[in-house]
Image (cartoon, helix red, strand yellow):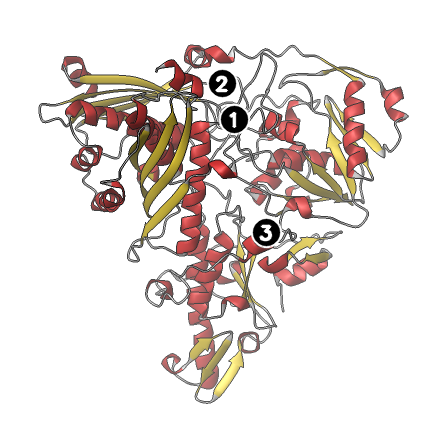
Amino acid sequence: MENTRRQFIKKIGSVSIAFATTGPVFVSGQGFSVETLENRLNKEEVNSWLEVLENRRVRIFTGKLELGQGIRTAIMQMAAEELDTSLDLIEVHMAETGVTPDEGFTAASMSIETSAMSVRQAAASAREIILKIAAKKWELPVSELNLKDGRVTGQNKEVYLHEILEGKQIDGAVDSSVAVKGKTVRKYVGQPIPRKDIEAMVRGEQIFVQDLRFPGMLHARVVHPPSYTSKIVSVNAAQIEELPSLVKMVRKGSFIGVLAEKEYEAISLAQKVNSLVTWDRSSVLPDQNELKSYLKSLPVEEKVQENHGNAESVLATSDRKLEASFFKPYLMHAANGPSCAVAFFKNDKLQIWSHCQGAYPLRRTIAKLMEMPEDSVNVKAVPGSGCFGHNGANDVATEAALLAREYPGRHIRLQWSRDDENRWEPFGTAMIADLQASLNADGKIAAWKCDVWSDGHSNRPNENPNTLLPSFFLEKDYGHPGIGYRGGAWRNAAPYYTIPNLKVDSHMFQGPLRISSLRSLGTYTNIFAIESFMDELAEKAGKDPFQFRLEHSEDPRAIECIKELQPKVEGLKLKDNEGLGIAFSRYKNATSYCAMAAKVYVNRANGKVRVEKLWAVVEAGETINPDGLKNQVEGGMIQSASWALLEEVKFDNTHITSLDWATYPILRFPDTPEVEVEIIDRVEEPAVGAGEASMAPTTAAIANAVYNACGVRIRSLPITKELLKSKR
């Protein structure tokens, strides 16, 4: 076939890593072709999204990565539906520079809305193009032809796709006017197709980048400094050179890495080298016990984000007014598998395997940091063990790349330790939401004012080397990455309710810890605050929490979501110290709907909270895979319960002290609540993502349930034993 990706991959000397039943993942073994396909990848063209293979299969290309959201399966369903082809004949190639379209980052619950819908329309367009080719060849009307399982048939004629294409690919534009079958046929779309990679994970088969192994591969470790701003004062190079098992030590400014034949040797060498390095430890972090007041004391960028009516005036004259301040601490991603990458450098070409969220953005940024042409760097995204946003994946990939260039011709595998991961990953920022609201004579909200204090919510690598951890310690000064993406701070800060007078102000600070994107961004804090406050206002108005929310809702989809939840928990018999709470949100105030209820038990003797059950009703427009959607929502509910009850990044005046699962506890299996999820499927509506829909209302519902159980209003997370015990 002419100019196929497969030929391209052959040219760069690829090997196929048989990653269990998830389908083959093609990764480059060694060597490169000067030619890349990137410049010919046009998202408006069908052949940028799919390729007909000679074995009857169709390969789909997506710029998104499987992060656990089930996008590989959803995309297969989309393609299979439009091509009327068995799922077994569809394979998916994910996120690789020069091979798949550049779709930026896999983030913000956008995989279904963007990539999956692009694949759907491209596959539908491909179907029509193929039928027209066959019709012309056989001189038959398209209406008499059928495309199924990789064959076109009609009037006793039959031909495979690759045969009718005569060795070429489908040449044509994606036609948005072509009707998609997924809205009507729904043979595959809308069905609970299970993810094949789950079984492979359970069996311990090769799935993740941490599993990658290459012949002759070296293992690496980086000697990380004691604080964000530490620099090397001195190195005992003579003793380091005498260390047994050391293949090479690489030093570039205050960046130090070691290479060894075996992983344990690399770990031991890094510890020994660290003992032979003297660091400047001048960095000083604030007193964590005073963090909230410290953050409010920082210089801020202030901006009015939303303003209608006259909230401040109404609040000033109201005699039925409430105000409260809510706080969320720094949170870490806490992935089960510490970040890992493999890099290979030869003949001025660099190949990287990474569990990053954006192959192209990482390539652009690493190329700039290493002062290499972009087309000399190839990044292949491979799933990692756990991803909830911008974790250490990009950093460890960059470190591996820096080390690989200093030792060409052999694959360099670098995996962070738990200590590395917890100390150096970018955290979800601490936030403060101060709320004021007033009620009118009818017990409805007359005015609402919100002031949000937050650091940025994304410092992803997008051509700025200072977003990559190694840039902190190299000789060249790349500067501080700054606040970064601000929009996440006021995401969902305006209540999704009808309020005549509303004002939202943002106060953006640059905080003391390294931050970037964590699942749901600022929505988590804002909905925790809003939905807690809604319960307080409902109580002040003397109304039931369900009734109060419905009285302020005009969107019929929101109303249905809340009403579907109500009978699941109404009339529930609660024992002593048990409580029930509810919450609602529409993610980004524009995508998926989620109504949530939580039942908790509060042990007033020891202050421990047990979340006994969570109920969710979710509506994400057209449902592509109800099983996948449920999995996403359930995972969000459980992770949110963990955030609410346990998680908080701790630090001293130098650096992070939450270094392991003892100092950064997460919810364990015995404490995992029962979860129940109901989906409202609206086939007529666009499909939207729901991966981050359940995080925020879950914690809000838990906080409201705690109040219902024991009368303690939660305004600061996590819900600590000390807080509950102190208010007995």
Q: Looking at the image, which residue is at 22% across and 32% down?
A: 545
Residue 312 position within the rendered picture, expressed as x and y whole percent measured from the top left? 21, 17
- Residue tagged by mark 3? 202
Which badge, 2 or 3, is on the more N-terminal residue?
3
In the rendered image, which quarter contains the C terminus? top left
728 displayed left or right of 114: left
The answer to the question of whether label 1 and label 2 lie on touching residues, with beta carbons closer than 8 A, is yes
Identified at 65% across, 35% down, the residue is 396
Give how far across and how far down residue 100 sits, in percent: 56, 53
Real-space Cα separation, disc 3 to disc 1, in angstroms: 32 Å
Q: Which residue is mark 2?
A: 511
210 relative to 178, above or below? above
Q: CA distance from mark 2 to mark 3?
A: 40 Å
Q: Up-down: is 637 above or below 126?
A: above
Circle nearer the viewer, 3 or 1: 3
What SS does tag 3 mark?
Answer: helix
- Give, as a three-letter code, the residue at label 2: Gly
Residue position marked by numbered label 1 in the rendering:
515
Q: Quadrant of residue 322?
A: top left
